[in-house]
C-alpha cells in the first residue's frame, strides 16, 4: 500500500518518466543546453516552447515535447507528417490556395505546397502597421514563421545523418573521395572534407556560372545543395556548441560551425551527434543516451567557471512538475467543493476544499521557489510572475481567513482569487518561456525583493478584499442571510482591505526610494506611480469612511469591489498608455479584456447598490 501511495505521489509530482513508447530520449538529451534569445536553457524547455508555439500543446503524437522534438531532429520526414500546426482560421488555409479538410491542426506536409503563397501574404501583412492587421493577417505571419522554423530545425542535424547519400557521377570526384564502385558519398563524409574541397575550387558563382569542367560543376552543385540545408538567417537555430575562446560567450549551431568556423575543436562533439543520430534510427535508447552524455560532457567542459552555470536538471524537473498547472487544478477543485459546501452545508466538503486549497498553494509555492532558484532573482519580474505570485498570496490569505473564521468564505475567496490569477497568467505564458532576460530597469534583486514584492502583496490584499466585497453584497441581496453572517463577512472584508492598504502604501514609498536611486527623483507623476497612489488613496478613503461611519456597509463593500478596477489599471493598464519610465511592455491584447472587466465591475456595484438602496426597501414597503 505504501509503495502504491509513493508511486501515486511521484506520478503527481512528475517524478516518473513519461511512457513515450519503447524509445526514451533520456535525461542527457532533455538537459542538453541550447542558447535562445539570450538565455541558456535545457532542450526540454526549448522543445516545450517550440511545440507550444506551433501547436498550443506541450505534447504531440502521444509523445512528450522532448521526445517529439527528437523525432523532428532525427526523423524529420516522419515528423513532417505529424499534425502539429494549429490554424484557427479556415480563411488562412484558403488564402494559401490549399483545399484541405477542415481541422484544428495540420502537418507540415499538408501546408508545404502553400508556403510560397503564404510568404507573399506574410510580406503584405507585415507591411501594414500591427494595429491595423486582421486576425487572419496576424495568423498568416505567425504560421509562416512557424513553418519556416520547423523546416530550419528539421535540417539542423542533417549533417550527422549517414543515411543521406550524395551521388557522385564524375570519376575524378569519385577518386577525390576514395569511393569504391557502386558506393555513394554520405553527407557527413562530404562535410568532413568540405573546407579542403572548397579551397581547391576556383572562385565562382555557386548557382552554376562557374564555367568550369564537369567535375568542378558537379562539386559546385553539391555545395549549393548543402548550402540550401543550412539555417535561414534570422530564424531560430540549434545553437548547442559553446565557444568562449575570445573571452566572450558565443554559441553556434552545428551547421554554422561546420561551414563557417575555421576550427576543429568541436570535431569530437560533432562525432557524438553522429552517434546519437545512428542510435536514434536504430532505436537504441541506451546508445542515444550515452552519445548525448558524451556531448554534454564535452560542451559543458568548454564553459569557463566565471560564467553563470545554468541548472538544466532542475529546470527539467520544474517543467515536469508543472506546478502552476497542478495548482490551477487544485484551486479549481477547491472552488467547486466550497460552492457545494455553501449550498449543502456539509462540513466535510469545507474541509476537503481547504485541503485542496492548501495543496494548490503548496504546488504554487514550489514552482515559484524553483523559478527563484533557477533565475537567481525575486519572482516578480514580468506579468506572468506577478500573476502567479498574487495567486499564491490570495490562496494564503484565504487560508488565514478561513483559519480564524471557519465558515467557508476564506476558502471561497482564496480559491477564486488564486484560480483567477493563474488563469490570467496563462495569457502571458503562451510563448512557452517565462524566464527570459529581465529588462534593464528591473535588475536589482534588493528592490525586487522589497518594493515589487511588497506592492504585489498589496495588490493581492485589495483583490482578496474585492472578492469578499462581492460575497458580502450577494449575501446582503439575499433576504435570508443572517445579520451575524453579514457582520462576519464585513470583518473579513475590513481586515483584507487593511492588509492591501498597508502593503500598497509601504510598497509605494519603497518604490519612491528606488526611483530616487535609479532616476534621481522620488516622485515624477509617472503613470505607474499615479496608479499606485490611486490605490492608496482609494483604500484609505474607504477605510476612514467606514471607521468614521460616513458610509454604511453596503457602500463600503461596493467601493471595495471597485478597488479591483484600480488594481488592474495600476497593475498593467497604465502600460497601455505607452509612456512613462515604468512602461516595459507586456500589454498585447489586454485592452479589450481590461475595459470589459471595468464595465462589469461598475455594473455589478451599481446594480447591487440599486437593489439594496432602492429595490429592496420598496419591496419591504410594499409588503
Image (cartoon, rainbow, N blue to C red):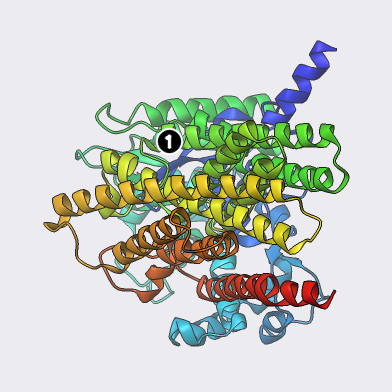
Neighbours of disc 1 within 10 Å: few (<14), some (14-19), many (20+):
some
Query: Depth check: 476 or 13 in front?
Result: 476
Image quarter hosting the C terminus:
bottom right
Location of mark 1 (residue)? 372
Rendered position, 429 above or below 21: below
Q: Position of residue 160 (x, y in %)?
A: 54, 43
Task: Name the image quarter holding residue 569.
Answer: bottom left
Rendered position, 152 above or below 335: below
Q: Residue at x 57, y 82 (%)?
A: 137
Task: Name the image quarter holding residue 97.
Answer: bottom right
- Asked whether the viewer can see residue 19, the reply is no
Q: Position of residue 114 (x, y in %)?
A: 66, 79
Rendered position, 607 above or below 477: below
Q: Position of residue 505 (x, y in %)?
A: 33, 51
Is 165 situated left or right of 501 in this image?
Answer: right
Query: Depth check: 331 or 501 in front?
Result: 501
Is 410 situated left or right of 98 in this image?
Answer: left
Q: Residue at x 56, y 78 (%)?
A: 138
Q: Position of residue 243 (x, y in %)?
A: 31, 40
Q: Residue at x 79, y 61 (%)?
A: 479
Query: Depth check: 57 or 10 in front?
Result: 10
Query: Depth check: 12 or 196 in front?
Result: 12
- Asked whether the viewer can see residue 240, the reply is yes
Amino acid at each position: 500500500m505504501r509503495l502504491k501511495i509513493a508511486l501515486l505521489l511521484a506520478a503527481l509530482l512528475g517524478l516518473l518518466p513519461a511512457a513515450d513508447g519503447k524509445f526514451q530520449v533520456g535525461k542527457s538529451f532533455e538537459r542538453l543546453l541550447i542558447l535562445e534569445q539570450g538565455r541558456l536553457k535545457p532542450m526540454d524547455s526549448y522543445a516545450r516552447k517550440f511545440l507550444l508555439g506551433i501547436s498550443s500543446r506541450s505534447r504531440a503524437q502521444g509523445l512528450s515535447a522532448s521526445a517529439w522534438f527528437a523525432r523532428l531532429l532525427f526523423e524529420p520526414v516522419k515528423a513532417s507528417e505529424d499534425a502539429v500546426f494549429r490554424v484557427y482560421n479556415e480563411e488562412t488555409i484558403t488564402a494559401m490556395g490549399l483545399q484541405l479538410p477542415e481541422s484544428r491542426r495540420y502537418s507540415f506536409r499538408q501546408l508545404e505546397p502553400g508556403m510560397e503563397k503564404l510568404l507573399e501574404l506574410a510580406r503584405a501583412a507585415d507591411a501594414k502597421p500591427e494595429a491595423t492587421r486582421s486576425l487572419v493577417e496576424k495568423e498568416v505571419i505567425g504560421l509562416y514563421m512557424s513553418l519556416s522554423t520547423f523546416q530550419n530545425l528539421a535540417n539542423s542535424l542533417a549533417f550527422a545523418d549517414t543515411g543521406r547519400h550524395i551521388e557522385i557521377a564524375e570519376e575524378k570526384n569519385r577518386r577525390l573521395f576514395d569511393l569504391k564502385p557502386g558506393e555513394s558519398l554520405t553527407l557527413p563524409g562530404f562535410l568532413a572534407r568540405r573546407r579542403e574541397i572548397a579551397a581547391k575550387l576556383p572562385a565562382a558563382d555557386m548557382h552554376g556560372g562557374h564555367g568550369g569542367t564537369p567535375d568542378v560543376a558537379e562539386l559546385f552543385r553539391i555545395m549549393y545543395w548543402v548550402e540550401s540545408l543550412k539555417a535561414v538567417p534570422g530564424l531560430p537555430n540549434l545553437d548547442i556548441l559553446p565557444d568562449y575562446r575570445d573571452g566572450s560567450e558565443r554559441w553556434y549551431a552545428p551547421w554554422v560551425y561546420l561551414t563557417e568556423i575555421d576550427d576543429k575543436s568541436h570535431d569530437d562533439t560533432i562525432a557524438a551527434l553522429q552517434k546519437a543520430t545512428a542510435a536514434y534510427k536504430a532505436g537504441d535508447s541506451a546508445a542515444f543516451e550515452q552519445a548525448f552524455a558524451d556531448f554534454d560532457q564535452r560542451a559543458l567542459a568548454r564553459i569557463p567557471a566565471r560564467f553563470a552555470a545554468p541548472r538544466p536538471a532542475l529546470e527539467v524537473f520544474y517543467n515536469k512538475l508543472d506546478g502552476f498547472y497542478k495548482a490551477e487544478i487544485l484551486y479549481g477543485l477547491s472552488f467547486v467543493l466550497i460552492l457545494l459546501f455553501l449550498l449543502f452545508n456539509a462540513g466535510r466538503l469545507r474541509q476537503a476544499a481547504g485541503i485542496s486549497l492548501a495543496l494548490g498553494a503548496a504546488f504554487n509555492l514550489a514552482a515559484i521557489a524553483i523559478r527563484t532558484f533557477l533565475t537567481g532573482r525575486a519572482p516578480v519580474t514580468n506579468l506572468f510572475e506577478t500573476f502567479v505570485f498574487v495567486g499564491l498570496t490570495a490562496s494564503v490569505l484565504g487560508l488565514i481567513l478561513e483559519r480564524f473564521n471557519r465558515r467557508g468564505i476564506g476558502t471561497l475567496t482564496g480559491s477564486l482569487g488564486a484560480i483567477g490569477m493563474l488563469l490570467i497568467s496563462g495569457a502571458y505564458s503562451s510563448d512557452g518561456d517565462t524566464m527570459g532576460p529581465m529588462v534593464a530597469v528591473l535588475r536589482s534583486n534588493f528592490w525586487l525583493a522589497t518594493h515589487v514584492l511588497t506592492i504585489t502583496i498589496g495588490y493581492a490584499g485589495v483583490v482578496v478584499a474585492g472578492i469578499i466585497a462581492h460575497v458580502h453584497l450577494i449575501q446582503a441581496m439575499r433576504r435570508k442571510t443572517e445579520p451575524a453572517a453579514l457582520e462576519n463577512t464585513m470583518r473579513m472584508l475590513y481586515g483584507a482591505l487593511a492588509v492591501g492598504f498597508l502593503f500598497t502604501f509601504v510598497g509605494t514609498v519603497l518604490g519612491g526610494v528606488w526611483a530616487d536611486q535609479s532616476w534621481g527623483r522620488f516622485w515624477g507623476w509617472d503613470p505607474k506611480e499615479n496608479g499606485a497612489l490611486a490605490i492608496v488613496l482609494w483604500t484609505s478613503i474607504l477605510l476612514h469612511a467606514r471607521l468614521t461611519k460616513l458610509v454604511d456597509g453596503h457602500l463600503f463593500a461596493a467601493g471595495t469591489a471597485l478597488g479591483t478596477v484600480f488594481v488592474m489599471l495600476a497593475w498593467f493598464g497604465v502600460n497601455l498608455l505607452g509612456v512613462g519610465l515604468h512602461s516595459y511592455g507586456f500589454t498585447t491584447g489586454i485592452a479589450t479584456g481590461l475595459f470589459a472587466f471595468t464595465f462589469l465591475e461598475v455594473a455589478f456595484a451599481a446594480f447591487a447598490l440599486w437593489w439594496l438602496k432602492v429595490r429592496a426597501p420598496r419591496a419591504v414597503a410594499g409588503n
